[in-house]
Amino acid sequence: MIDYKRLDVWRKGLEILKQVYIISARFPEEEKFGLTAQIRRAAISIISNIAEGAGRNSNAQFINFLSFSKGSATEVEGQMIAANVLEFISDEELDNICKELDYYCRMNQKLQEYFKNL
């Protein structure tokens, strides 16, 4: 079994989760059960899928869950773009979180490639 807590990609996902919670805490109250809840669920899925995949029985299954995690990161990006369009976050905040998400996705892809080649 893979110790996911030692993986840089999981730790980066945890940093993103924290940023998403900080940013979304400032969303309007009426978004509590809308965009705020949705973006937080997607951010939690980033790290949850890595943890779940690490507990699976094969590298192929782990790769599949890494792919789900990357998809969740892309979902967060789309939701952050929506938050920017709705003027919940600034252009600068959007740029910063998108850079972090892009870096995460590249890390994730490299890890997938590593496990494919084992």
Image: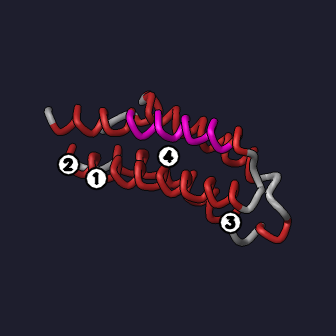
> Is residue 99 rendered magenta in the image?
yes
Marks 1 and 2, how far apart in space?
A: 6 Å
Badge 1: few (under 14), some or many (20 or more) residues near its Cα, within 10 Å? some
Identity, as a three-letter code, of the amino acid under mark 4: Ile
As drawn, 101 above or below 89: above
Marks 3 and 1: which is nearer the front? Answer: 3
Give the mark nearer the N terminus: 4 vs 1: 4
Disc on res. 60? 2
Q: What residue type is labelled 1?
A: Asn
- Give neighbour class at mark 3: few <14, some 14-19, many 20+ (Cα, 10 Å): some
Specify start and end residues of the magenta stretch as a single range: 94-106
Residue at the image point whose x is 55% and y is 51% from the top: 77
Q: Name the residue under label 4.
A: 47
With 17 as the anchor, is 107 left or right in this view? left
| Residue tagged 1 | 64
Give the mark nearer the N terminus: 3 vs 2: 3
